[in-house]
Structure formats: structure tokens, C-alpha cells
Amino acid sequence: MKAFIKAFNKLLLRLTKKGREKIEADRKKKKDLEEKKFKTIKKQYNAILQKADKQADEKNLSERKRKNKRDSICPKCGSENVNDRIKRMQGSMRGEMSGHYTNLLLFGSGAIHGHTSSSFDTNEVNKCNDCEHEWKKDDYSYIYTRHVIEDKLNDIKYFLKDIKEAKDPDFDPKDLEEKFTSKEEKSKHLLDKAIDSYYIKYINDFWGETSTEVIEKIAKKYLSGYSKVWFFEEFNIEAIKEYTNLKTLDEFIKDEQR
Ligand SMILES: [Zn+2]
């Protein structure tokens, strides 16, 4: 009996030891996976911001080049002998007004006493010294990373909206302007159109290496107000996976481990 109890206790200990080890191993596995997920999310998140940043830079550079060209070549005669008209005016008025420039040339001398002054930015013009032609300085708005992000999230939103409408289109056979004979026909037409649009290519090109979880995190951070509400109203992971190359985080991790 004593020997039996001894053996039983030994077995029990082994079992619980094994049990403990298993629990420990499971815990470690889970922790490793969580860490891996976090690392992947962080990597994808920063990669997409960098991508947007780069696109914003490229866009700003080409806009600046376009502006410089438009401001330095006369559109009428093609001459490059072009002056900045406001700069010359500024020079003659310096001393009297600083920081802001007066509107006296626009409103007459009375304005001088009224201290009417405003920035000349909006009145800046280019003047051609060869043909005297004057034209308004070109304006461009600076593109920030968040503009690119918003734009790219809009691709997803509009695409999913098109898909949703195509799957369940408004159809009224009594509507005199209705071009389709059945709801199914209309649905097929709209779905073909949605799939044939550029959205899929745009979405794959920009978001292809980003998991749907990270897209959600980006949208939560970069969209606000109504555009955020609207995005999440349309964001449908099943639909986006059906038509684009987009993957979930788990699919990315599975692919990495392969
Ligand atoms: Zn000219």
C-alpha cells in the first residue's frame, strides 16, 4: 500500500508538472503571438505613414515646379523676362507701412488716412517686361500627409459604397427614367461598373501591404467628425476582401510564418 501511494503521488506530481509546463508553454505562445501582432501592426502603421509622407512630398514638389514655371514664363509671348509687380510697389512704400501693405493703389489716396491696410498676397501679379502682360500669381495649397491619408481612405469608402449600392440597388419599374428591366439586371450592371473602376487598383497599390486592422487604426486617428462616421459606416471587411488584395492581420502573420 505504501509503495502504491508513493507511485501514485509520483505520477500525480509528474502530471501536474506536465500540466504546469503545458500551461506555461501555452501562456508563452499566446504572449509571443500578441507581441508578434503588435510588432506587425506597428510596422505596417509606420510604413503606410511613410508612404503617405513620400507621396505628399512628391506632390508638393511637382506643384512647386508647376507654380514656378507659371510665374516665370509669360503665357502671352513666352518671354522669361518677367517681374514680380508687388515687390516693386513694396519697395516704394517701405517705411510708411511695415508688415502689411496698404490698399491705397486699389482704393485711392483716401485710404491712406483711413489706415486701410491689408496683405498684398492676394493682389500679387506677374508682369512681363516684353509685352506688358500681367497675370495673377499661381496659387497652390500645400499637401500634408494627412491629406494623402484622407484621400486614400476615401478610395476605400467610395468603393465600398458603390459595392453596397450595386448589391442592393434602388429599383422602381414604374420610374419612367429607369433604364433597367429588373433589379438583378441593374445590380449586375452596377457591380461590373464598380469592379471596373480604378478604385481597386488604387486601393491595392496603396493599402496592399496594410492589414484591415491597421486601416481601421489609421482611419480612427486621421479622420474626424462626419468623415469618420461615414468611413466606418461603409467599412466592411468581408466586402473589401472579396474584391481587393487586402488582408487581415491574422492572414499577414500566417503568410509570414509560411
Ligand atoms: Zn509677354
Image (cartoon, rainbow, N blue to C red):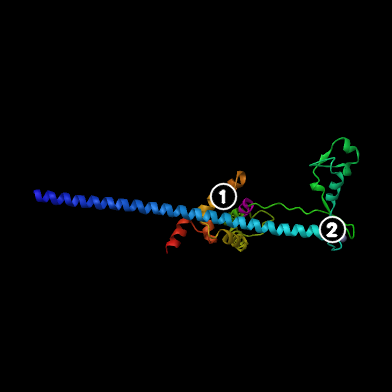
**What is the span of residues highlighted in magenta in the rendered image?**
145-151
Q: Position of residue 119 (x, y in %)?
A: 79, 43
Q: Is residue 101 above or below residue 164?
A: above
Amino acid found under the numbered disc labelled 1: Ala
Q: Is residue 176 left or right of residue 206?
A: right
Residue displayed at 85% across by 50% down: 88
Q: Position of residue 163 (x, y in %)?
A: 58, 57
Q: Is residue 158 magenta?
A: no
Amino acid found under the numbered disc labelled 2: Val
Residue displayed at 65% across by 57% down: 57
Query: Quadrant holding ligand 1?
Result: bottom right
Q: Residue furthest front?
A: 95
For the stretch drawn in magenta, the main secondary structure is helix
Q: Residue furthest top?
A: 114
Looking at the rendered structure, the secondary structure element under dot 2 is: strand
Q: Position of residue 128 (x, y in %)?
A: 86, 58
Q: Position of residue 255 (x, y in %)?
A: 45, 62
- Confirm if mark 2 falls within 8 A of ligand 1: yes
**Residue beneath disc 2:** 82
Q: Residue furthest right?
A: 109
Q: Is residue 110 above or below residue 153?
A: above
**Residue beneath disc 1:** 219
In contact (CB < 8 Å): disc 2 and disc 1: no
